Image (cartoon, rainbow, N blue to C red):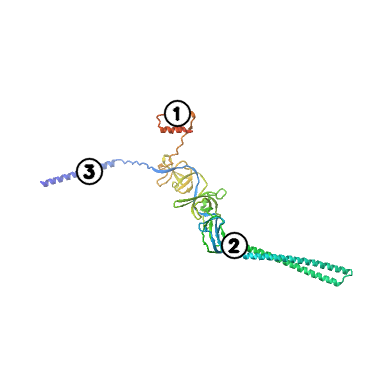
Amino acid sequence: MRFLRQSLMGLFLLAVTLGLLAAAVQVFSSALNERMSQEPRAQQQRERVFTVNVQRADPMTVTPKIAVFGQVESQRSLDIRASSGGVIRNLATTFQDGGRISQGQLLAQLDTADAEDARARAQSDLRTAQSEVREATQALEIARAEWDAAVEQLTLREKALARQRDLESRGVGTAAAIETAELNLSNARQQELSRRQAAAQSEARLDQAGNQVERAKIAEAEANRNLADRQIFAEFDGTLSDVNVVEGGLVSANERLARLIDPNALEVSFRVSTAQYARLLDASGGVRLANVEVVLEVSGVKLQAAGQISRDSAAVGEGQTGRLIFATLSEARGLKPGDFVSVFVDEAELTNAVALPSSALDAQGRVLVVGEGERLDAIPVTLLRRQGDQILVAGREVAGKLVVTRLTPLLGAGIRVKPVGESVAPPPEQPAMVELSDGRRAKLLAFVESNQRMPADRKARILEQLAQPSVPAQVVNRLEQRMGG
């Protein structure tokens, strides 16, 4: 009995299982047939809207800047050199790197013993030459006096000979007397010639003595100059650098001791491209005296100085490109010659220009603007300048439009967008203002003050507005409407 009961239970369970399977197959078949019999329906898709940052294109007058690198230099510098060799006996206390000196200050003094001896010898030679001049002058005076005496003697001998010949013509004189007179005249002529030659020699001696005095004076001046060169003075106010000498050291002639730099006369030299240089030219072809700004940034600290272009290089250096320009700096506090700085040069002003982020321009020179229905339009623009992360474009194409500030591969013409940004809404218009007469103002004030239902803070604000010379027209109209009601 037990076996029969278990067998019947198993058959019952099997029958139930088969029935359930048959029902499942029937449900699946009916669902499949119904699905196959239905007509396919197209799935309705929604248009995707992208959110973009936009900026309103407001044309304005912009001054572009050229950003380059330059080096600070000194307009006035001087190498301090020793004019003659010797031992340095004295140095100024400020004769060191970074020492501040003033014009005319004694910086260094060399050993002057040899120079003083040379000057003493030159002075002694000058005195000797001057003594020789005095002796030659006296000798010339004596020689000229002897010459005059010889001339007088010659004149007397000529008269004596003439007298003897006159006596002979009258039969009184003799031939012997005439011969004696002629012999004396010849001796007198010879004596006069000798005295003349002595006077000429005295004159030549005096000239030689004068030349010796001139040479002695030149030697003395050279000795004094050599002695003065042993002292080195500052030519102008400045700061010393590259000092390479110590007290007691031996220096040679023309050896550089230090370099004197004027820290208040600084300029910056920078190189620009040929295209940038062309934008800095004026109508006459010369470089404009444009304003420049110099910035030295180190560890978050900025040293700034302003200046103006003064000149440009006369030629392009070998192996160089572009143009080298110099600008004079004013009030360059903290800057030193040799600093490597950033230079910003003002170009000519650009009118009707729009400043946009550089990411707003695509490779084809177009920008995306929000058009009708908040769909994007691609508009070609004229690129005027690139200024770091910004660009300057001509404003005639995009004036007053909303420009997408950042392009992505998903954006293009015809795409619907949702613009966001501070410049989406146009700037609020200023409220219209009216000027009130005294009677009209008094009526409005009386109405506001008598209104007991108006909050105190609002009443105070309206009374303050009515006390002004010009009152918003909206406030006046609202109050008059209430007064009329």
Residue 107 percent location from the top left of the image: 55, 59
Q: Which residue is mark 1?
A: 446
Residue lying at 68% horizontally and 65% vertically, measured from the top left: 131
Observer-nearest of 354 and 191:
191
Q: Secondary structure at mark 1?
A: helix
Tell which tag, 1 or 2, sits nearer the viewer: 2
Answer with mark 3 or mark 1, whichever residue precedes in sequence.
3
Apparent side of residue 272 relative to residue 22 in the rendered image (left or right): right
Q: Secondary structure at mark 3?
A: helix
Residue 41 percent location from the top left of the image: 32, 41
Q: Secondary structure at mark 2?
A: helix
Q: Which residue is mark 2?
A: 227
Measured Cα–Cα span from mark 1 to mark 2 = 100 Å
Compared with 66, 470 (above or below) is above
Residue 60 percent location from the top left of the image: 49, 43
The disc placed on residue 24 is 3
Q: Residues within 10 Å of mark 1 (few under 14, many from 20)?
A: few
Observer-nearest of 431 and 187:
187
Measured Cα–Cα span from mark 3 to mark 1 = 90 Å
Tell which tag, 3 or 1, sits nearer the viewer: 1
